[in-house]
Image: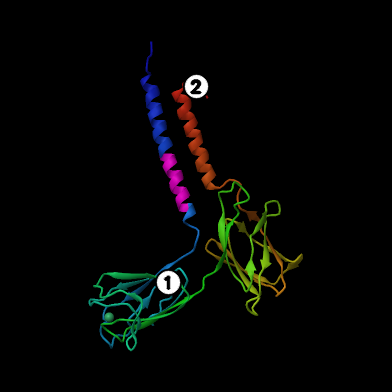
Amino acid sequence: MNTVNPFNSIIISISVRLFFALLTFTVLFMISFSTNAFAQSSYDVNIPTGAADESAPFFWQSEKDGSTTGVVEILTGDTIVWKNADTSFHTVTSGSETEGFDGIFDSKEFAPGKSFTYKFSDKGHYPYYCTLHPWMVGTIIVTAGYSIIPNVGKQVGDGTTFFDVEYDFNRLLSTATIDEEQKSVTFEIIGDVKSDNHDLELRLPSGLVDGPFVIWVDGQKISDFENIREGDLNVLFVSLNADSKILTVIGTSIVPEFGPMTLAILGVSIVSMIVLSQRFKLKI
Ligand SMILES: [Cu+2]
């Protein structure tokens, strides 16, 4: 005869729910992890009240640097959102009053309280104006972003915690090699020299390697570098030479063996084991 213990079925039902909750959490976590790869930003440019009047003190107000010239400097991949905080309609149209619309972006007339968004993918100067109030002019200046070394840290630890390392240099940095024992990241410097400025800006996520740092270039310990903390980034400025080949950054902590994602998966596994053992009435 088969009897069902009501207490057991409650436990199973709770475990199943917990299992799915944890599974959902893990999946969401993985998604947020994989989309966090590139640092792209969005900046608001407000059109203030009264901008329709030619004698207004200013026609734009940039969130990025507080400037009111309509000139905003951004990096490739960044987005500008023009917000109409005025009581009149406006347009944000690339080009100039004399030359007209240059074919790149045109908001058409947009109402008070509305906004217009444009993402800048290419380097360049983008002058714009308002077709209704041609004294409203500005320029978006898009400069090249940082070069990226992808997936740094994937070969070590549990393989789930890795980063895109950004840098700015007149040559290329090849794949980074991590030494977990030494807590170091080594970069190979390759390619042709593109300018006379041999200063390297290297933006290392603190989750990858954290300071204080010791830096070696081609087997020589160097002291000619600066380290600035920018949020979660250690920004290193290192003076290199035209023929520098190997750069090693030694820190005090390196990408962890067990990342948060592994711990989440571990959690899910434990709960599944409990569920299964309840199902099959095993004792664990
Ligand atoms: Cu206008």
Quadrant hosting ligand 1: bottom left
Mark 2: which amino acid? Leu
Q: At 41% across and 36% down in the image, what residue appears?
A: 18
The answer to if 23 sits in the magenta stretch is yes
The kind of residue on which mark 1 rests is Phe
Q: Tell whether circle 2 marks a residue whose Cβ is less than 8 angstroms from ligand 1.
A: no
- Location of residue 248 by image quarter: bottom right
Query: Within 10 angstroms of label 2, few (less than 14), some, or many (20 or more) residues?
Result: few
> Who is closer to the viewer here, 43 or 121?
121
Q: Secondary structure at mark 2?
A: loop
Rendered position, 104 above or below 161: below
- Up the image or down, 216 lies above or below 84; here it is above
Q: Nearer the viewer, residue 206 or 266?
A: 266
Where does residue 51 sit, x and y in percent of width and height? 28, 81
Q: Residue at x 38, y 13 (%)?
A: 2
The residue at the far front in this view is: 103
Answer whether labels 1 and 2 touch (C-beta < 8 Å): no
Q: Residue furthest top?
A: 1
Residue stretch in magenta: 21-32
Residue found 63% across the figure and 54% down from its top: 254
In the picture of the structure, the residue carrying the numbered disc 2 is 282
Disc on the earlier residue, 1 or 2: 1
Disc 1: CA contacts within 10 A as few (<14), some (14-19) or many (>=20): some
Q: Secondary structure at mark 1?
A: loop
Q: At which x and y percent is residue 152? A: 60, 57
Q: Which mark is residue 120?
A: 1
Q: Position of residue 37 (x, y in %)?
A: 50, 58
Please identify the quarter of the rendering in which residue 53 is found.
Answer: bottom left
Q: Is residue 183 left or right of residue 64?
A: right
Left or right: 202, with 223 as reference point: left
Percent of width and height locating residue 172: 63, 68
